[in-house]
Amino acid sequence: MCFHLLDNRYHQACGKPFQSTSILGNTSCYECLQEAKVDSLSALPRKTLDSIADFVKVLKKAKKVVVIAGAGISVSCGIPDFRSKDGIYAMARNMDVVLPEPECLFQIDYFRDDPAPFFEVVRNAFANSPKPSPTHWFLKLLQDKKKLLRVYTQNIDGLEEAAGVTRCIPCHGSFAYSACMRCKKRVPTSTLMPVIQAGIIPSCSEPNCRGVLKPEITFFGEILDDKVSTMITKDRLQADLLLVMGTSLKVAPVMEIPGYLPSHIPQVVINKTALKKKKLKSKKLSTGGTMSRVSGKRGGKKDEDEEEEFDMSLLGDCDDIIRYICAQAGWDLDPNAIEAAKNKPLMHSSQVISHQDSTGKQIYCFGECQCKNKLAAGMNDDDDEEEEQKQQEEEIEEDIVCNRCERQIDTEAQPGSGCKTVHYRCEYVFLNLLVLSSADESD
C-alpha cells in the first residue's frame, strides 16, 4: 500500500499525485494495488509447461497475451531478416559501399553522412509488395478471440496492420510514412518506391528544401517513442502469457521486456533458434522512461546471473509452428493465412522432435532439428560454451577482411595494394578500426 503525504500530496510508493476524488480514498492508487497483486502472484510457484498440450491449454485459457514479434515472422513474406545467412546484414557485406559494420545501415549518424547504403538495401528487400504471413493472421486471430493484450513488434514492414491487428506497438517505427529530415514534411513511403527502385535517394519536393526523405523508423542512436515504455509499464500488470516470435532479442529495450514482466507469467519462444532472456535486477528497463534504441552487447563472457531460460521453446519455421498449434487448439486461421501458406502441408506430430535443456525446460524442434541434436547427445553447458566461444573466434577471424580488396588480414597486417583505408568487419565487436597504409602513415 502507499500512503498520502500531506506535505506534497504525492503517493509514497508510486510517486504519483494524490487525487482527492479517487474512489480508493487517500491511502492508495490503482497502480499500486495492481503492483501489490502482481508481486503476490509472482511469489507463488511457477506453472511448468511439460508438453505442447500444456502450452495449448495455457494459450486457450489466456485472456491477456503479450507478443514480442521480430523479423522472423515476415521472412516467408519475402522480407529478409537481419542475422541469417541471407539476411539484411549479409546483404550489407556484399554491397560495393564500404561499411565498418553491417549495423551501420541503421545508425543515424551514418545515415546522415550517406543514406545511399540504406536505400540500396530497401530497394532489394522491398522489391515486391509483401502480404501478411500465417503468423500475422494468427495475431489477428488472437485479437478476434479477445485474447490479445498487445503486440510489440520490432518490424517496420507494417504487415501486422495489413492483417488487421490494431493492438500493436511498432517499437522501431513504421515504414509506412517518410519524413523530410529538414522541414519534417510527411509523405507515404509507397509513393517513393519508384524513385528508390530506380536507385535514387528520395528528397523533399518543397521549394528550397531538398532534404532527404527518411522512413519513420527508429535508427540506432535515436530515441524510441515514449509510447513503448508507457504501454509496457501498464501491460505488465495485466499480462497472463508472453509469446516471443521470430526475434533473436538482440536489441534493447525490447530484449529486456521478458525479464521486465512478472515472474509468474508463462513465457514461450517461437523462433528459429533458442533464446535466453535478460534478468532485470529492478522493475525498470535499463533506459528508463525515454528509451534509446541500441544494439545488444556482443561477445564477452556470459553473466549467468543475468540470463534465464524461457518456459518452452518451439523451434523452426514460425508459420509451420503456428499452423500446428492452431490445429492442436482446434482454431481455424483466416482463409488468407491458408493462401499465404502456399499449399504447404501441415506439420505432423511425428516431425516434432522433443528435447530438454539443462534446467529441464522443454524444447521442441519442428521438422529439422534446430539445435543439431546437441541436447539429445547429452552435451553439457560447459561443452556448449566452449564450442560457442570457439565458433565466435573462428567467425571473427573470418570476418577480418579488407572491404576493398577482400584480402583476409589481421590487426598487424598491411593492406593490399591499392588500399588506403581498411575497415575491420567484426560480427561481435562494433568498432571501426582503421589501418592506414604505410604511404598514408608517412604523410
Image (cartoon, grey):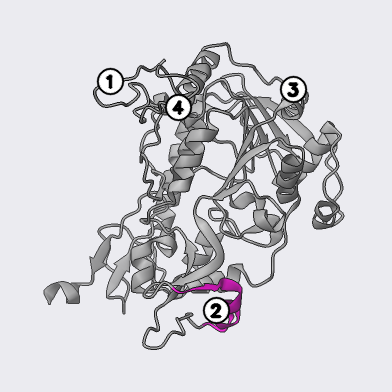
Residue found 82% across the figure and 55% down from its top: 336
Give the structural element (helix, strand or loop) at label 4. Answer: loop
The residue under label 1 is 6
Q: Against 385, is 160 above or below?
A: below
Q: Nearer the viewer, residue 381 or 6?
A: 6
Closer to the chain start, of discs 3 and 4, is 4
| Main SS of residues in magenta | helix
Q: Against 95, is 5 above or below?
A: above
Whether residues under marks 4 and 2 lie with C-beta atoms below 8 angstroms apart, the answer is no
Residue 1 sits in which quadrant? Answer: top left
Residue found 71% across the figure and 53% down from its top: 164
Q: Position of residue 143 (x, y in %)?
A: 72, 42
Q: Nearer the viewer, mark 4 or mark 1?
A: 4
Q: Nearer the viewer, mark 3 or mark 4?
A: 4
Residues at marks 1 and 2, CA–CA distance in whole angstroms: 61 Å
Q: Which mark is residue 21?
A: 4
Residue 55 sits in which quadrant? Answer: top right
Q: Amino acid at mark 2?
A: Ile
Q: Which mark is residue 196?
A: 2
